[in-house]
Image (cartoon, coloured by chain):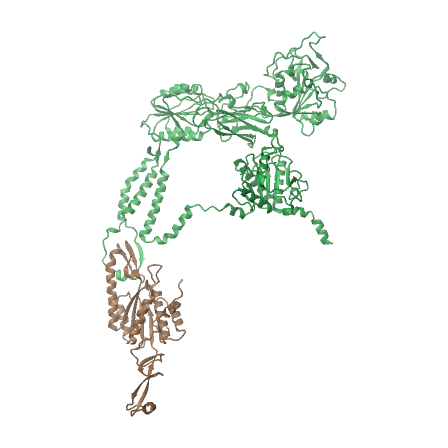
Chain colours: A green, B brown
Amino acid sequence: MNFVFAAPWALGLLALLPLLWRLLRVTPPEPARVRFPAIRLLLGLPQGQDAADSTPPWLLALRLALAAALILAAARPLLDPAKPQARSDGTLMVVVDDGWAAARDWPARRAYLDTLLAGAERAARPVLLLGTAPPADGGPIASPRLMPAAEARAALAGMEPKPWPTDRRAALKALGTLEVGKVARTVWLTDGLNGEGSADLARTLQSAGGRLELVHGRTGRQLLPPAEDSPPDRLVVAIRRLPGDGPERVPERVVVRGLDAAGVVLARDEVVMEAASATVSIILPVELRNRLARLDIEGERGAGSVVLLDERWRRRSVGLVGDERASGAPLLDRLYYLERALTPHADVRRGGLAELIGENAPAVLILADTPLVPGALADRLAALVEQGRVVVRFGGPLLAQAASGATGDPLLPVRLRDGGRAMGGAMSWTTPMGLAPFGEGSPFRGLQIPAEVEVKAQVLAEPSLELASHTWASLTDGTPLVTARRQGKGWLVLIHTGANAEWSNLALSGLFVDMLRRVVALSQGGDAAVAGGALSPAELLDGFGRLAPPSGAAAAITEGVEATRPGPRHPPGLYGPADGRVAFNLGPRLPPPQALPLPSGALVAGLEGGRAEIDLGPALLVLALLLAMVDGVATLLLRGRLRRALPLAALLPVLAGAPAQAGDAIEAALATRLACVKTHDVAIDRDCLAGLKGLSAVIALRSTANLAEPMTVDPERDPVVFFPLLYWRIGPSQRPLSAAAMDRLNAYMARGGLIVFDTGDEGQPAAGPDTAELNRLRAVVQGLALPPLTPLAPDHVLNRAFYLLKEVPGRWDGTSLWVEQPGGSGANDGVSPVVLGGNDWVGAWAVDERGRPLHAVVPGGERQREMAYRFGVNLVMYALTGNYKADQVHLPAILERLGR
Amino acid sequence: MLPPPRHQAQHLAARLPPLLVAARRIAATVAQGAHGRRRTGAGETFWQFRHSQPGDAASSIDWRQSARSDHLFLRESEWTAAQTVWLWRDGSASMRWRSGSELPVKRERAELLILAVAALLLRGGERVALLSGGLAPTTGVGALERLATALEREEDSPRRPGDGKIKFNSTLVLVGDFLSPLEEVAAWVGGLAATGVMGHLVQVLDPAEETLPYAGRVRFQGLEGEGELLARRAQDLRAPYRARLAAHRDGLAALARSLGWSFATHRTDQPPQHALLALYAQLALVRS
């Protein structure tokens, strides 16, 4: 234990205590005042001794203690449980790892350092402060210089973790140039990661004099981007952490979130990490998945735990035109190879052209050897290209023939000559030809060309002046193999050979897959890949994983993101033009984390040691306050006024004690409010409450129903009869109900309550009759007296209660909504006691404190959210008014009868 | 909440037999009383026969009795007369005091005693009057109410009424704390006694005035502008104060004795019945 005073000069006031003692001794306490009728008898009586008039000794001691406590509190005593340091005025050297891995618990690290430097300030020790990560200005690591601890504290306040790894070799270099005097103590606040030069740095620090103290915090975890060709229904993300011992080894729950560009959490999944690495699968519908802009580890800050997603992870819908299949001979099918090549990366739809370019046209349309004739269909397709779609066409005998026809083909990047050419046939002198290297400006640039790729036949472009500029790939003799033309926002691409193995073995090669991916990638409008070249920084991550405008020494990436090392010149972030951002992530550029080996002879400590410094000042102030209160009571006692002060004492418990908590039931009964059934799944409960809150606000705005703040009720414990509507969001881990809760809910339904069961499973890729939530629901409602159910009819009161509705979307837009069969039980005037669906309405209604929606709606659009709210209003009106609106239908007839 | 003093007083008086005030001096009567004076006089009750003496009117001879013997007899009836009891309670500021909230104020207790005595006297047919205030001697059913109303109306006054209204054959009941200097009390009481009335003094004191239970540094303040006294150690004053109080009481008792009056003390923490009984005994003693 080390006991120090932060403001020792205040102790000088203790010298005043004897003076106070004298003063109190000579000042008698205020006499008690008594009105006394028989005073005439008292007057003139001989008075006794005056000695006992002074303050009683115990009161004197009390007051002296009070003054002493105040003075001691002013001196700010600190109880430092750290081992007493050698009393020396030597230099304190502080080495801080401020790379990405230190960001996870940076506040704790800073607090530790602040405590350390405060101690040095008290001891008036000079400080050397060294950060091991390269500074953001791109320069070398500055040599530490001797400075007073107060200045070092100011420097520390400006220190932030960097979004790149530490460079201990550079730090060693900076240290080497320093004339190390007598360093008395060295503290290395490390991020726990091994790296180049770590051992050398540790050695140098140990030799600088004093003992090396190695202080560990929590090391940041790495989040790796999902494989670009991850399975169609999920993103598989790998997490890596330090395999070392200590707290990192304990199985920990890691939650990975997926956010869209606006910061709305679209997906959230968790895994319990036991080993050094783990994977998390994020399952999302494609519409949502394409909106993902960022993955990160929940609750962890740092550039290493953030993955930015760019177009490479978006899945594009690709339409393959052609509905006929060559039955029995799939390998001869014109679309077979295309389908196989595209399925891992894109959503492939196959159908007739008219069908595909209907309502929801895919981003890329591939026509393999399919000639087009001018007409409505071609015009529509051309319009789609103008809007940004990509049309990819493959050559073939039909196209070769049609292109030479009188009408020509309206959607080709270049004019085609009659017929094609065949090479290496029996009647030809030429041999099949390989591909020439891709030229500058080609989107295929950088792809490896396998030597075995040969083209045996192709369609030929009409030579023209611009032909070269439209060419993305050519054969070794310079004949264009791939030509493309920009049209509006979209592209027309022609591959001059076939999509199957008939004309070329290109379709059998890996190059075919890569080329198709690059072409498909064009459809997002980004031609960054086409432009190639330098990618200028657009938005960069800071050390805490936040996106910010570029600053400092950030420069453009020229060699491609795969080859660039993150550092001050290239911090992780988004690079490239606005319509073609490329994500440069830190995670994949980092080696797997390895624990820093402990230098022999070094002290190892945790951050907790620094934090445990106890400031005794407040405790002393409280003590002084208590003494003052005792003194007040004693004074009143001496003056005989205690009785008069007693009513004041009655106030004390009121001030001290919190008001007793009113029962939930009382609160529930005081106002009309909606309620969530407690599911014991925190996320679902929170969502449900937020959803009902949002809905209550909307209802208050649009109708005269003023609902109070919604509540969460536990049917196992709480009475439910007070609520017009219970919302039960069933999760996959919903626990079954006890018999008492069943009875409660049955009674609730029998007396006119409305329970909304929401499985929230319509948005799942495999939505259907067999989801986990539905199975849970089946198990949960076993003992509930549910009436026979029927799908919601269009003319049901629920669709008429406030708004006239045709659809009931929630966060998802599923179709199934079930209510009681009309005339089913006849109880409650035919008002259904249950509404059962899976559209996750609370998800759509949920708003945060500022009233912004918490979740995206799928397929999306404000209209869907509005419809969800309208359904919510109808639902509440239905719960509040029952079949009132159904009766309203008969009003004209009733009026007519009355009039007659 | 205690009922008003009048009801308390009636309640208290109901427990005692009617109090007959002995009249020692019956000279010129003012009014007929309801009870005999054991003397010959105007009345309806037979008292005695006596021999006729020269000078007696012939009409006053009881011929029926005289016919039985050789002497002439006169029939005399007993003299019945009401006596007036003058009541007084100290109305000065020092009476409005009590040492604790559980005790009655001294003035309340004094009024209670007075009214109780008055109730007893009225039941016995006597006439009662207030020494201070304008109430003339009164009797009958409503007299107690009138008395109580007059007491309530009367304001605080340290003034001691004189003897102007008192007739010589009356009885005085004086209730107060009698904490004034003995000379003042003696002068006043002596003035009253000079009219030849019979009197009873009842000293009502708070227990704190007897025991002086204070300790420590106490500043005593008088209630009638007597000034202040700072007692450095109040407990030191206790013994001399008691001695002085005892001396004062002795002086009062001696004063009463010298006038042929009675003196009693009463503490407000004692039940009022004690004082009433003592007063009753004194009034009855005088009668015999």
> Considering only vertical position in the picture, is A805 above or below B172?
above
From this viewpoint, is residue B212 visible? yes
Indicate the position of residue A459 as horizontal and vertical percent values: 70, 15
Residue found at x 44% / y 31%: A107
Q: Position of residue B250 (x, y in %)?
A: 24, 66
Task: Name the residue nearer the viewer: A584 or A256.
Answer: A256
Above or below residue A296? Residue B224 is below
Number of marks present in the image shown? 0
Asked if B35 appears above or below A640 in the picture, the reply is below
Camera-nearest residue between A560 and A254: A254
Q: Which quarter of the image is occupied by the C terminus of chain A?
A: bottom right
A70 with respect to A219 (left or right): left
Q: Is residue A84 left or right of residue A165?
A: left
Give how far across and how far down residue B152 sits, in percent.
Answer: 39, 68
Left or right: A358 in relation to A608: right
Give the position of the N terminus of chain A as an image quadrant: top left
Residue A44 visible from this viewpoint: no
Q: Which residue, as the protein is rendered here, is positioned at the far right?
A: A406
Q: Is residue A833 left or right of residue A651?
A: right
Q: Quadrant of residue B129?
A: bottom left
Q: Position of residue A430 (x, y in %)?
A: 68, 8
Nearer the observer, B142 or A233:
A233
